[in-house]
Amino acid sequence: MRTKLVAGNWKMHGNLAANLALLTRIKDAAAGFGSACAVCVPFPYLAQVQAVLSGSRVGWGAQNVSEHAQGAYTGEVSAAMLLEFSCRYVLVGHSERRALYGESDTLVAAKFAAARQAGLTPILCVGETLAEREAGITGPVVTRQLDAVIANSGVAALKSAVLAYEPVWAIGTGKTASPQQAQEVHALIRARVAGSDAQVARDVQILYGGSVKPGNARELFAMPDIDGGLIGGASLVAEDFLAICQAA
């Protein structure tokens, strides 16, 4: 049986004082959670997160990783470096990385492989833009992004990964896919994986990310193929993030 996971993505937000207050609230509340929760934070805050959350029920991770193990790649951060801060998770292929920094399906697949090979759990993000949804090609776009990873690492690699469907048109816009719209794509993703391995498809967690809030989380998470959320803005507000975790 799949468990629920709520992962916060702080994006490029935070400062040491605010982080401490937020992390302390989450850590104290997490003891009563029936679901798993985690935070994915900017690189400079990994040491602080490790210090505050060590020994708690809250996992943590980074928002990006290099496809390279080491070398002359100024500004990059390797999976091995993330492990030194006891990271469990790393986001791979977030829509902002794809759109703003030109990360291709091939590059995302390489980052996914590097994360897994180092022992991290990649949270692989897939999703379509508004133009792609309106053109009726949500399915082909999402499956193309997923297939690139499966082709590179094999479907069995998803046993040690998490998937996240994030409709780009619903990220930070206040718009949210209806529970039925989200479920439709989650079911499509699971069916695509099942085409290669039914057991992996049954077991893999698929999160929904796209303006999840306390007011809509419970209905979204009640869908049969939605296994939790990848939370952006609401993960920066303790009350909202904790309410979403409780909904899970």
Image: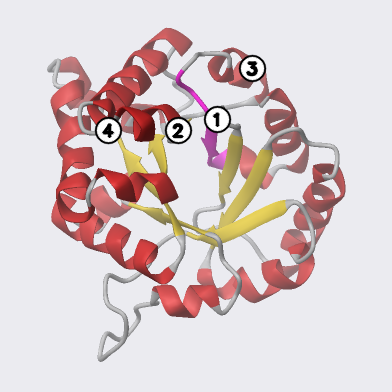
Residue at the disc numbered 3: 218
Instruction: Say whether residue 66 is visible.
Output: yes
The stretch in magenta equals 225-233
SS for callout 1: loop
**First in sequence: mark 2 vs mark 3:** 2
In three-dimensional space, the C-alpha distance between marks 1 and 3, rounded to whole angstroms, equals: 17 Å
How far apart marks 4 and 1 lie (CA) works out to 16 Å
Give the labeled residue for mark 4: 197
The x, y position of residue 136, in whole percent, is: 15, 15
Q: Nearer the viewer, mark 4 or mark 1?
A: 4
First-in-chain label (1 vs 2): 1
Image point (34%, 78%), residue name: 76
* Location of residue 141 by image quarter: top left
Could you say whether the residue bearing mark 3 is in a helix, strand or loop? Answer: helix
The three-letter amino acid code for the residue at tag 3 is Arg
Between the C-alphas of marks 3 and 4, the distance is 29 Å
